[in-house]
Amino acid sequence: MQRIPRELARKYAFDWRDEPLLRVQPNEAFELETYDASTGYFKSESDKAIPGKRPGFDRVPALANPIAGPIFLEGAQRGDMLVITLEAITVDDYSWVAIGPRRGPAGELTRWPELSTEYTTKIFQHTKGPSGTTRDGTLHFNHKISWPITPFVGTIGIAPDREVTTSLDGQGEWGGNLDIRDVTVGNKIYLPIHHPGALFYLGDVHASQGDTEFTGTAAETKATVRVKLDIVKSKKIPWMRIEKPDALIAISANKPLEIAVETATFHLMDWLITEYGFSPTDAYCLVSTCPDFRINVYQMCKIGKLSFVAGAEMPKKYLS
């Protein structure tokens, strides 16, 4: 099986000019060893998020959130749709979260001074699950609180059409740093292709995350990810889509949040109209009346140029 080792998974931009690190056939499984969002800086609670001490933080934007790629998919062309299947995500034996002054929404508050005057790093130990791996293991928040590891890929995408954008704050219909918890094993991710070979990148795995990633970092970790890519020829979609076994999710990123929510809902309506035979009237009324329609707010961080990421979700049971 082809693999990109971790030492090569250190790109910091989605760049159509990059030479591919792998060339794969449709439905060929390959593996990527990814760094965490700090490129390995956070190893213990003594490692603080002080910009002057972090390698790469003398650059603007900072060299953070490394990705592996690009991967060239044989046969992929502009105007096709990319189908991404994440077959397995195996996270490292620990993850971290880092807070401090001017980081996240509480980084300048006077209400709780410890959040805006002190740098704090928390390290979460992982234990293996029944499989003998961390794929079904447990994250230990402290000696009292723990939960199942729920790994997902935070930064995923292909080279944008004409621009070059960083893996730290780049977002668009092509993917980017979106931190969507549903980009995980068992779901299919769809993206519009802009370049021959698609030029696929992946990184920034999280062991778990709550809605909005409120502090700006979640349970950040290294990982090994097994992936397959496929193509749907001559199929155009407006933005990233996710198909779960039991639901459809249309994605958008924008500011303010209500624009992201509205646009994601319009993307979902378009999906229902173009592929499931709904009339515009029925699709519009369904998202307003169905009790199981959901808006997922995946990422709402006050960091750099990041937009807010929303997903409009409809269970498949209403589509037949």
Image (cartoon, rainbow, N blue to C red):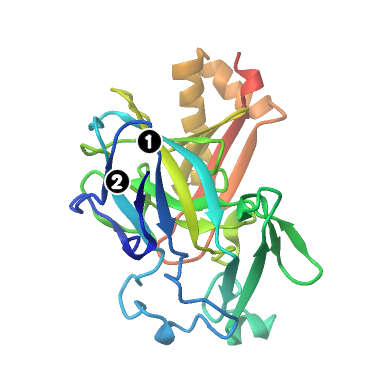
Q: Residue at x 55, y 62 (%)?
A: 92
Residue type (three-letter) at the residue carrying disc 1: Leu
Left or right: 157 with respect to 188? left
The residue tagged 1 is 229
Can you give x and y, in whole percent of width and height, for residue 259 in the image? 49, 45
* Label 1 packing within 10 angstroms: few (<14), some (14-19), many (20+): many
Residue under label 2: 71
Which quadrant of the figure has residue 104?
bottom right
Name the amino acid type tagged 2: Ile
Question: Crowdedness of circle 2 by 10 Å Cα count: few (<14), some, many (20+)?
Answer: many
What's the residue at 39%, 68% (across, down)?
64
Residue 49 position in % (x across, y down): 50, 80
Between the residue at mark 2 and the residue at mark 1, the CA separation in whole angstroms equals 10 Å
In contact (CB < 8 Å): disc 2 and disc 1: yes
Residue at the image point whose x is 65% and y is 31% from the top:
293
User: The residue tagged with tag 2: helix, strand or loop?
Assistant: strand
